[in-house]
Amino acid sequence: AQTVTQSQPEMSVQEAETVTLSCTYDTSENNYYLFWYKQPPSRQMILVIRQEAYKQQNATENRFSVNFQKAAKSFSLKISDSQLGDTAMYFCAFDWGSQGNLIFGKGTKLSVKP
Amino acid sequence: EPEVTQTPSHQVTQMGQEVILRCVPISNHLYFYWYRQILGQKVEFLVSFYNNEISEKSEIFDDQFSVERPDGSNFTLKIRSTKLEDSAMYFCASSGPGQGTDTQYFGPGTRLTVL
């Protein structure tokens, strides 16, 4: 069974600094997809970034980038130039391509301090 | 930009009552999902729906739950007889229309409170 682990329940960072959130997963699949979702206090789930396992190049979206290490089954999220609006829960999620369910980690609560 | 919408944003109900949560997926999407998140816990998959039938469901999705696409735009989740433990945030998501996995886009959620 696929599992997703986020080992950092809470993190904090100073505004304008860089922070990295960790995620590891376990799967026997070779082709799959990984996501980071952001959940601000409003509790809406917002897609941050997506990575296809068959792509070696790490995905980037503006200030957000990932470090995808397929052999290590690691998928960390780097937030550069942190902003107060980045304060949120961040969930790592896995999809092995069944058009079925996303498997979520337990989340990391990120606080950006002024 | 197209988005998934959900109504109501907050539903309060008495234990044993039926509730229907409504979702309007993104218009050209073909795959629809319901997830729930109990306060302070992770998001859990309930059910996926494609081509007017359930394609996958979790252990949580028992006989008390049902889903329906009553027309070309709405996607509903019904809980037949609510329990206290059904109190949670319920998220609808949609994806497609492409083949294979596509990104799931989530609605803003419905907070269900069962008293």
Image (spheres, coloured by chain):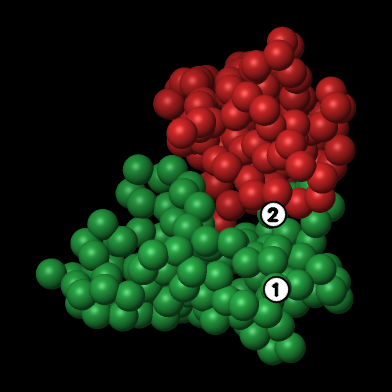
Chain colours: A green, B red
Quadrant in which residue B75 is drawn: top right
Compared with A87, B111 (above or below) is: above
Residue furthest to the bottom: A72
| Residue B74 against residue A22 in the figure, above or below | above
Q: Is residue B69 left or right of residue B54?
A: left
Vertical side of A99 occupied by A53: above or below: below
The 10 Å Cα crowd at callout 2, few under 14, some 14 to 19, many 20 or more, is many
Image quadrant in which you'd find residue B70: top right
Residue B21's disc is none
- Secondary element at tag 1: loop
Amino acid under label 2? Leu
Question: In the image, is A40 to the left or to the right of B38?
Answer: left
Determine the secondary structure under disc 2: loop
Distance, label 1 to label 2, CA atoms, is 19 Å
Q: Nearer the viewer, mark 1 or mark 2?
A: 1
Q: Residue at x 69, y 54 (%)?
A: A102
- The percent coordinates of residue B105 (x first, y second) are 57, 42
On residue A55, the disc is 1
Q: Chain of mark 2?
A: A
Q: Residue at label 2?
A: A102
Q: Residue furthest left?
A: A114
| Residue drawn at point x = 76 percent, y = 65 percent | A32
Residue B62, position as x, y percentages in the image:
80, 35
CB under 8 Å between callouts 1 and 2?
no
To which chain does the residue with label 1 belong? A
State whether residue B84 appears in this view.
no
Q: Which residue is drawn at the image coordinates 21% and 62% (left, top)?
A: A84
Res. B19 image quadrant: top right
Question: Is residue B20 visible to the viewer in this orientation of the structure?
Answer: yes
